[in-house]
Amino acid sequence: MRVRHFRQLALPLALLTAALPAPAATIQFDFRFDDTGFFTQARRNVLEAAGAFWSGVLADTLNAITPGGVNTWTAITTDPRNINLDVSITNLQVAADAILIFAGATNLTGLAVGGPGGYNASGTGAFLQNVEARGEVGATQGAAASEFAPWGGTISFDSDRNWYFDADVSTTEAFSGFDFYSVALHEIAHVLGFGTSDAWFARVNGAQFTGALANAAFGGNVPLFGTGGEHFARGTMSIVGGQPQEAAMDPDIAAGVRKRMTRLDLAALDDIGWDINYPLDPPPPPAPVHLPLPAWALGLLAGGIVVRAWRAV
């Protein structure tokens, strides 16, 4: 028998008044605990769009969890209807490359909470390894942890928040309310181990994250928020699409603001064992090339009229 305890869901996200490679690991959502019908089809679409982003940047291939015979297991995760309770699903089938997230809503003080699930399992060594690490090589527990590859977990959203559900997340327009897409991206990262996995905390020293790739993206150890170490410090900056942006994984977001995953956010996931396909930053705009003036223009210059010929490359 192997028992894997799961870390408490990451602290609630606080309130403030390019083409990608084909996916390998894929985020899948399960709405069986959405008893109140919070997730209308339009709302599911926005959550699925956030999952599609992560499916596009995760390059890992994960083993299936297929119980049968002596191989049995129970997935244990936070109940999205009541984050103070757990739910158990016996012999949950998890497909190869799938990361299964139970989604729901309840009355929260913050915007949302999310984190990975745990399990009880018994069976062959190969089966237990699939439940624990999905075929990834490297320690997943303890101070030497270098990988994290869960079966999935839970995200719960505040049920009565003034949310903005964007029908087209590829564009950014002015809006009021809290951006559901941004919050979903953030909470999925917690399910993937940001601020919740042993591989994360193996790289936390005091109030700093020391992962080598995040350090390279930031220019040194990355400051963390508070004593829990589950978020980057408020105001931590990085880039996305070649432009500066506050890190998506700092602890808060304001109404009317969209946050996409920055290079720093992705580098931290890379540090804890995920294989990341980084979105390409757009190239800088071409500089104009000034061509020599033709002979006929010299006379115009003498007359006080300046003519410049140029082209973009």
Image (cartoon, grey):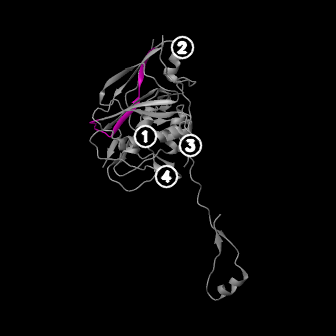
The amino acid beneath tag 3 is Tyr
- The earlier-in-sequence mark between 4 and 2 is 2
Q: Main secondary structure of the magenta part?
A: strand
Residues at discs 3 and 4 in contact (Cβ within 8 Å): no
Circle 2 SS class: helix
Q: Nearer the viewer, mark 2 or mark 1?
A: 1
Q: Which residue is mark 4?
A: 244
Q: What's the mark number on residue 125? A: 2
Dot 4, crowdedness within 10 Å: few (<14), some or many (≥20)? few
Circle 4 SS class: strand
Q: Nearer the viewer, mark 4 or mark 2?
A: 2
Magenta stretch: includes residue 77: no
Dot 3, crowdedness within 10 Å: few (<14), some or many (≥20)? some
Q: Which residue is mark 1?
A: 48
- The earlier-in-sequence mark between 3 and 1 is 1
Gap between marks 3 and 4 measured at Cα = 16 Å
Q: What's the mark number on residue 278? A: 3
- The earlier-in-sequence mark between 1 and 4 is 1
The amino acid beneath tag 1 is Glu
- The earlier-in-sequence mark between 2 and 1 is 1
